[in-house]
Amino acid sequence: MKAQAIYNVPRSILGEGPVWDDRLNALYWVDIIGGKVHGLKDNRVDTVFQINDFVTCVALTSNPNYLLVTLKDRVVLVDVNARSIVKTLAKVDEPSTNRLNDCKVDAAGRLWFGSMDMNEREPSGSLYVLDPSGTVRKVLSGVTISNGIVWSLDNKFMYYIDSPTRKIMVFRFDLDKGELMNKAMDIDLSRHEGIPDGMTIDSEGYLWVAMYGGGRVLRIDPGKRVVIDEVDVPVSYTTSCTFGGDGLMSLYITTARNYPREVEREGDDGKVFIANTEIRGYTANKYLVNL
């Protein structure tokens, strides 16, 4: 499979975290360095939120007028129509050299979000979970770059990426309690070009992992721990992916410009790409928000 750039989408410095809202037929994603949340609906692009801070992830809520957005060290509720923060839902105590990174909502409406060392060297990051009640719990520590999060279709396993390990960790998962149990296994991706970044799952239970620096998204059979297909992307820095569009059969892929390690130039890196997969995706979970 091959992906192509969506022509009218602006280039992000560090595009990340795409999520499809099936209620509005809209795609959201963030530009972490640019401090923006973008939206794409009816072939029209809009910046639905902007702030002078890192904007590290975006997630859907049970009310389509509100989004959950993670910044450098806090989780905020954003009113899409007013384009402003309604309230801060959580703040975490992280080293000054850390920031938050990828996030995902589980089937019980909890937000899982992680942190990372901005120098990408020290295991100073963590993985947190925010319950709808507003309680924040740290569930993992010793993380260097917290990235892709997704659950098996039966919610018995959680798949999690700490990028420098070049592995997908597979944890047994208790959905009722919102807890990680013991680690069942690792899926080793070290033989593949690039570093595993963001991830999603399809309706058949296969994982799709963006390989940063590899210019591709891998489709993985988690049971057999093997790559069974891939999507070629014509830029190197693929960061994450999600299914959307008609029948959830299009794969949207975010990319980066490798800022600031690369001299600025014109190109499609940093844009959102799309691939027609003929494989149905999985509807994104929504955080249970009470206003």
Image (spheres, rainbow, N blue to C red):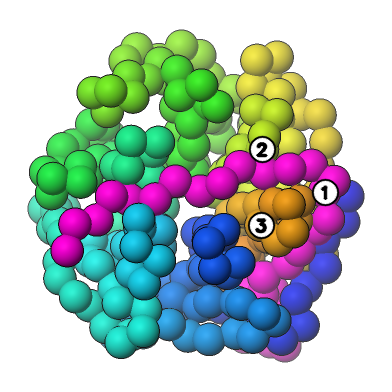
Q: Is residue 284 magenta?
A: yes
Name the residue that disc number 2 marks.
Answer: 202
**What label does residue 277 carry, if any?**
1
Q: Position of residue 34 (x, y in %)?
A: 43, 81
Residue shown at 81% from the left, 29% from the top: 228
Estimate how packed mark 1 is, as few (under 14), some (14 to 19) or many (20 or more) residues with alpha carbons within 10 Å: some
Mark 1 lies on a secondary structure that is: loop
Q: Position of residue 21 (x, y in %)?
A: 53, 61
Tag 3 and tag 2, C-beta contact below 8 Å: no
Estimate how packed mark 2 is, as few (under 14), some (14 to 19) or many (20 or more) residues with alpha carbons within 10 Å: many
Q: Nearer the viewer, residue 2 or 283?
A: 283
**What label does residue 216 carry, if any?**
none
Name the residue that disc number 3 marks.
Answer: 244
Q: Nearer the viewer, residue 235 or 4?
A: 4
- The answer to whether residue 97 is left or right of residue 221 is left
Q: How many marks?
A: 3
Residue shown at 43% from the left, 71% from the top: 32
Which mark sits nearer the N-terminus, 2 or 1?
A: 2
Q: Amino acid at mark 3?
A: Gly
Q: Which residues are magenta?
A: 264-291
Q: Is residue 41 magenta?
A: no
Examine the rendered structure and indicate whether residue 16 appears above or below residue 183.
Answer: below
Q: Residue 280, located in which quarter of the rendered image?
A: top right
Tag 2 and tag 1, C-beta contact below 8 Å: yes
Instruction: Give me the C-alpha separation between circle 3 and circle 2.
Output: 11 Å
**One can see residue 223 in this view:** yes
